[in-house]
Image (cartoon, rainbow, N blue to C red):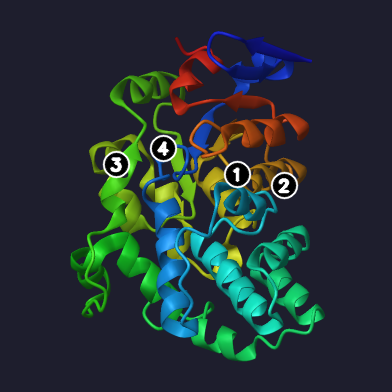
Amino acid sequence: MTMKDNSSNMLVSDSVVNDVKDVDAIIFDCDGVLVDITESYDTAINKTVSYILNDVLDVQADNIVTPEILYGFKSKGGFNDEVAVCYAVILTSYAAKELEKPFTEIIKGVIDNSNETGILSVDKYLTSINVEITSIKEKLNYFGSHETSYIYTVFDQIFYGAKLYEQIYSKPATIETTGLIEKDKVLINSEIVSALQRKFRNKIAIVTGRGKFAFSYSLKDFLDSFDISNSIFLEDESKELAKPNVEPLLKSIRGLNSKHCIYVGDSMEDMLMANKATEMGFKTTFCGIYGTSKKPEIKLEMFKNNNVPIILDSISQIPKALNLV
């Protein structure tokens, strides 16, 4: 059974309404939740793909990562990292060129055959249709460090811009551009923070695919609102810990000493991670945010079809959804 608040596009299950008093902590994803990234990270995906296709394959392709393609990958549960989406699209473009077939035809097959293993499922599918991808994989070097990986080096320069890139990595930028991080739109505000602190006190943390530098840069006005010591910034961790790997969330839950937490995210990976935590005995209620998507109606349906207990258009609805106001 679900209770719907028609005035605010909010869906909250009856079980959550009855159970909310037991919640003692709240953990947030960042991108698409605390920050609207449609003009920053999402734009960086297309600009990275365009730059690399031109540089490596001599292919001109602007804005080929449509909202439908982005959602297609994000709905599979293995593409929380924006660079993984770039990788998948670049390899698909390479395959289309090699096979002399339309990109739109190949990308459909790639998405349909992708799964929680992310780029490994992309590699497997392209190999299965007889595309030799060894050389392009070696060029992209996805599993290299941010300092050595070609695909990460391009993405980071486009996202951070030359000045911040040089500050972070202590090496000169080769792409002169203003960082798209400047277009992050912070969605949390002091009213939301105050409501959360009244309920959870200091048990408010972060588990995000974003790195700590990028998080701190965009959320600088609200850093004191979160328990950073019990937060996880996955860009700074091993790629094996990427969502939907549940271990980072469990580490945060243990650090907060939480008996029942809410995890607020906006993706399939976030939902899978929260559900896995509960399966492992760490009670976690998932709250899905859909309004920051370029295709919010599709994400809303995804959450509804997966029986997500709390579905909100925006983080601004959290205090009302949890009866904090």
Foreground residue among 282 and 146: 146
Q: Position of residue 136 (x, y in %)?
A: 57, 85
* Residue 260 appears in the rendering: no
Q: CA distance from mark 4 to mark 3?
A: 12 Å
Q: Is 14 placed above or below 230 here? A: above
Number of numbered markers: 4
Q: Nearer the viewer, mark 4 or mark 3?
A: 4
- Distance from the alpha carbon under mark 4 to that under mark 1: 13 Å
Give the structural element (helix, strand or loop) at label 1.
loop
Q: Amino acid at mark 3?
A: Leu
Q: Which mark is residue 267?
A: 1
Q: Mark 1 or mark 2, which is nearer to you?
A: 1
Disc 3 on helix, strand or loop? helix
Figure quadrant of residue 18: top right
Q: Quadrant of residue 305?
A: top right
Local packing at callout 3 (Cα closer than 10 Å; few below 14, some 14-19, many 20+) is: few
Q: Residue furthest bottom?
A: 135
Q: CA distance from mark 2 to mark 4?
A: 23 Å
Q: Residue drawn at (50%, 65%), measured in percent from left and top?
A: 83
Q: Are marks 2 and 4 in contact (CB under 8 Å)?
A: no
Mark 1: amino acid:
Ser
The earlier-in-sequence mark between 2 and 3 is 3
Q: In the rendered structure, which amino acid carries the disc numbered 4?
A: Leu
Please tell me the numbered disc located at residue 223: 3
180 lies left or right of 63: left
Q: Name which residue lies at 64% across and 53% down.
A: 246
On the question of residue 100 being in view, the answer is: yes
Which tag, 4 or 3, sits closer to the chain's start?
4
Labels 3, 1: front one = 1
